[in-house]
């Protein structure tokens, strides 16, 4: 099972689950984006970063790492902290930061090396063990979804049925219901690769639900929403590329990278990269 990509898909759909995991309130009226970012000087790619809106400088950047297998090379912690500090060096964010390391099982944690013991009691670093969520009661929908990933196969079907029933009861918004039920399906696709999505839908009686007018309308709205988000993302990328194209001319005019980044509203690391290529 491709555990990492499954978790990242869940967090991308509902970033608030990460805040639930670390027992922090999800910021109100603020939407985090869950993304991957390349740390340019090293060609590292950080696959899980929750980034607040540019105006929310009081909110932290959240680095998320999922570990679903044994760290045979002994580089888990050194890689994580190296990438975090290289990211901070490259992008120079004004926001504070938190690192969340999620283990599917506690026994996969090799232990914090001596070099990083200062983080053992730091509020900037949180370790989560999903197998210990089983000991908790009254889990939210989001945490119950994560619990479903690690639950034993013989218990998974009944747990998924209960979670689908809870979703339909607790989420009044049909679009939110649709997205969450599709995440439950996705967990089963990863957990039981021998089953097709159609077989999973039949198993949970979702065929009839998906044919209802309300569900179809919610799905259509979701597709349109995704299309608009894609158009806006493309527009923003095109606007940024246009600004970056002007950087060489401004450098020749004697402006410093810091001045260009501030004037054009660009990331300083991106401006510096263009400057290095001149």
Image: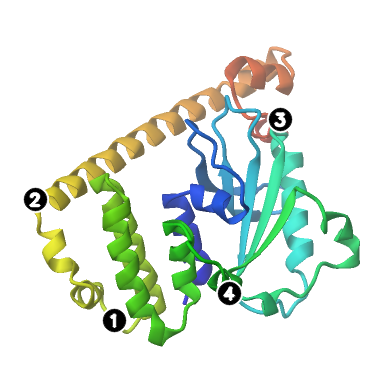
* Distance CA(mark 3)–CA(mark 2): 47 Å
Sequence-wise first label, 4 or 1: 4
Disc 2: which residue? 213
Classify residue 276 by image quadrant.
Answer: top right
Sequence-wise first label, 1 or 2: 1
Q: SS for tag 4?
A: helix
Sequence-wise first label, 4 or 3: 3
Residue 182 shows in the view: no
Label 1 packing within 10 angstroms: few (<14), some (14-19), many (20+): few
Query: What label does residue 94 carry, if any?
Result: 3
x and y, in percent, of residue 214 in the image: 13, 48
Q: Residue at x 26, y 56 (%)?
A: 168
Label 4 packing within 10 angstroms: few (<14), some (14-19), many (20+): some
183 lies above or below 223? below
* Distance CA(mark 2)–CA(mark 4): 39 Å
Which tag is nearer the camera, tag 4 or tag 3?
A: 4
Disc 1: which residue? 195
x and y, in percent, of residue 93 in the image: 69, 33
Sequence-wise first label, 3 or 1: 3
């Amino acid at each position: 099972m491709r555990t990492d990509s499954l978790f990242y898909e869940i967090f991308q759909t509902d970033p608030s689950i990460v805040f639930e995991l670390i027992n922090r309130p999800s910021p109100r009226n603020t939407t985090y984006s869950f993304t991957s970012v390349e740390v340019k000087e090293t060609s590292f790619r950080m696959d899980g970063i929750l980034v607040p809106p540019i105006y929310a400088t009081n909110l932290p950047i959240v680095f998320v790492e999922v570990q679903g297998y044994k760290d045979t090379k002994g580089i888990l912690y050194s890689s994580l902290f190296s990438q975090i500090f290289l990211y901070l060096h490259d992008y120079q964010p004004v926001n504070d930061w938190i690192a969340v390391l999620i283990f599917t099982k506690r026994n996969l944690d090799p232990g914090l090396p001596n070099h990083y013991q200062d983080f053992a009691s730091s509020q900037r670093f949180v370790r989560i063990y999903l197998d210990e969520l089983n000991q908790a009661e009254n889990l939210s929908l989001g945490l119950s979804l994560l619990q479903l990933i690690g639950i034993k196969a013989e218990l998974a079907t009944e747990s998924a049925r209960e979670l689908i029933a809870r979703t339909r009861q607790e989420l009044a918004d049909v679009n939110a219901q649709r997205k969450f039920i599709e995440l439950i399906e996705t967990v089963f696709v990863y957990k039981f690769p021998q089953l097709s999505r159609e077989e999973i839908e039949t198993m949970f009686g979702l065929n009839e639900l998906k044919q209802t007018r309300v569900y179809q309308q919610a799905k259509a709205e979701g597709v349109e929403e995704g299309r608009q988000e894609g158009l806006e993302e493309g527009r923003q990328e095109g606007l940024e590329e246009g600004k970056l194209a002007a950087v060489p001319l401004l450098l020749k005019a004697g402006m410093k990278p810091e001045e260009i980044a501030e004037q054009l509203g660009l990331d300083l690391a991106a401006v510096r990269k263009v400057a290095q290529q001149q």
